[in-house]
Image (tube, grey):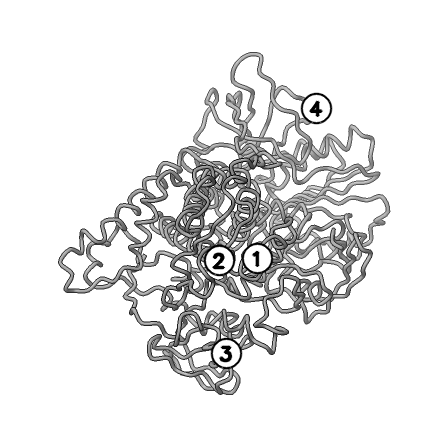
Amino acid sequence: MAILEIPSSCPFSNTRNLFSDLSHFRATPGFPYNDTLKARIISRYDDVVEVLDNPDTFSSKPTVPEHPPPVKPIFAGKVPEKSTLLNWDNPDHDRLRLSVSSFFVPRRLERFRPVISKLAHKLLDNIAGQGTMDLKSAFALPLPLQTISLIAGLDPERWEWIGRSLELFGSPITTGDTSIQEKIQGILDIHEYVMELIQARKHDRRDDLISHIWNQRDAGIVEMTNMEHLAMIPGLLLAGHETTTNVLSMGTARLLHLGLWDEACENEDSRKKAIEELLRYESAIVGMRRELTQDYDINGVRLKKGDQIFAAYNSGSRDQLRFQDPDVFDMHRQSKTQHLGFGRGVHACLGAPLARLLLRIELDILHQRLLDLQLLTPYEDIEYHPVREGRGVKGVEIRWDATKALQQVRIAPKRARQSTSITEYRLVIEDVSEVAHNILQFTLRAAGSGINLPKWTPGAHIDISVGNLGFRQYSLCSNPFDASKWQIAVLLEQCGLGGSRFLHGLRQGGIVTARGPRNHFALEKARRYIFIAGGIGITPIRPMLESARHSGAHYKLIYLGNSRDGMAYADELETSHPATIWPKDEKGRYDLTTLANEDPEGLRILCCGPERLTTALEQVCASFPLGTLKTERFQPALENAAEKRPFDVELRRSGTALHVPASKSLLEVLNENGRGIMSTCSKGTCGTCEVPVLEGAPEHRDTVLTPLEKIENTSMMACVSRCRGERLVLDLW
């Protein structure tokens, strides 16, 4: 994390009059230059959005300055030069964001609600009887620090030390400083601590962000170095607590001042509405700096390559051209325009879903525990820190009825935290046999007497430990009616990440660890089946063939491969099932278009294979009824460049029918019709706008859902994802 050389002066006339200054900037033609920021101010909503939607032109490089020369040799190899995602432009930014984005999906973060609530209650247990406190220092600061430390994988009991170390990131360092080593020791210490945790989690995974990044690395979803892994954590710790601390402090003061505290905290829905309006009205993020990588015109104004600009998010969220009565705090505001409280685009606040969850919990528990809450500091006397990229108050004194607070019974969370433990099985390798060129079949039984393997169904997979590389997923390919053993077939991938090479080194009698089984490619009941396998994609299909034969259904197999010697089980399947074995080197390319002549009535087509096969098959079956085709890919489809087609949407709960034209996103159409779906990034990277899907096949274009979740098709990201067919049914009003 770079140490910022921040001037003490404020770029605006008065810290309390921020929005008057921003209004002046919006009314000023062009983009006025600010001497303190050394940048031109971009203040109008549409102009700010244009900046944020064009990250290749507006580089985030100046957001966090480089390490000053005095500390560079001290930090070398210990503190990353780039220590937050804001430091990276593409292509590195999107690559690294993949390591963390799926962790912050709102519904996944809900599992942390009980433990966050417990931390909040513990803080209030110690102060409820006092009757007064500084909200910021006693609650709004420690709770976010404890929360983000816990979720990242650090010890929340060390929150004060972590907080002090993070404060050093903003300390100015000059060449005349005689105690540089002493001053920056806290930064070195926290990076050393985090790196030790990263090394520990490589072999001891937990339910935390550090472990999640390892899981993404092991699965091949992202390639990154350990230093890049380290760079993800301190920046998130800093941003993850500062924003929430300041929004809660300023927001609570605002709600109490306006007499809206009880109304805002009444229930979960009212808390959500209040928080969104607080983020619009007075976000803790004023804006961010950018640098132009090329000449560019905005609204008729020519900006030059190398120009520094300041995109004022807070100003855009108060733009009267986009928000009705923008200077009025309205908890019941219904706007078609998304506020910029957390930014937008690829650099939108990664932790926004966590901040929203934490703010809802904080408002709820403060309202429960501190009865008759009032401002002790007059609202007009609240002091603000100097305003730059962020905004916050120095403190907010509040008071409450201490007698009632002590009598108040703590309300326990209604939902217990889901268990994060995963059942693991020790398996003995009973047999290893070669079933095709570079493909080994492993027959596995439970290690130890009297231990039964879990039941499974065709299409299921298990996670197999591959030593220090973590776990890899392999489809079960044994007879589904034989519960005594499992079989997997492993293709040796010469250019892979090492998992298959590890397994190919194992021998009969060895012990492996497995998790599962889980099934996201289940065989549904049907009168007729067509099974299509490409290469090693035969593994989940093999037990499906046995199940189809056992059920008496009509079925056939089309098995495609480059050459017969590389097609596992080809001879067995050809003699045991109605199968077409098609090696390309002998017969040429198989004509999938012949499948378009199949009668789809009562038919299910199941395909597992490489992307080119599944994509081609989806095109052939595009006219078939939804649900006829089910695919399992070796890796998620890359669809962001796909053509945008119009489609229809039914909102099942209300019966409302909507049309999504090619020129608009599903999110835009939903919000134009008053559905109020929240969004932060608008690029499919944050997970905020996830909506539940009941029917239809989404065309997933996000980078948040896992490949298995995309196959399940039970949810989608409304900002970027669309429909493969003509119609979707969503579980919305």
Q: Residues within 10 Å of mark 2 (few under 14, many from 20)?
A: many
Q: Secondary structure at mark 2?
A: helix
Instruction: Kindly report which numbered mark, 1 or 4, lies closer to the viewer in this rendering.
Output: 1
N-terminal of the pair, mark 3 or mark 1, is: 3
Identify the disc placed on residue 23. Answer: 3
> Residue 475 falls in which quadrant of the image?
top right
Q: Residues within 10 Å of mark 3 (few under 14, many from 20)?
A: some
N-terminal of the pair, mark 1 or mark 2, is: 2
Task: Give left or right: position of 147 versus 720.
Answer: left
Q: Residues within 10 Å of mark 4 (few under 14, many from 20)?
A: some
Q: Position of residue 242 (x, y in %)?
A: 42, 55
**Image height check: is 382 above or below 135?**
below
Q: Residues within 10 Å of mark 1 (few under 14, many from 20)?
A: many
Q: Residue at x 18, y 51 (%)?
A: 182
Amino acid type, mark 3: Ser
Q: Position of residue 343 (x, y in %)?
A: 50, 65
Label 1 close to label 2 by CB (< 8 Å): yes
Amino acid type, mark 2: Val
N-terminal of the pair, mark 2 or mark 4, is: 2
Tag 4 residue: 481
Determine if residue 223 is in view: no
Q: CA distance from mark 3 to mark 2?
A: 21 Å
Tag 1 residue: 275
**Image height check: is 177 above or below 354?**
below
Task: Give left or right: position of 712 versus 195.
Answer: right
Instruction: From the viewer's side, name the closer residue of 318 and 551.
Output: 318
Identify the disc placed on residue 247. Answer: 2
Across the whole image, how many numbered discs are drawn on residues?
A: 4
Instruction: From the viewer's side, name the closer residue of 186 and 314.
Output: 314
Q: Position of residue 372 (x, y in %)?
A: 55, 48
Q: Position of residue 528 (x, y in %)?
A: 82, 40
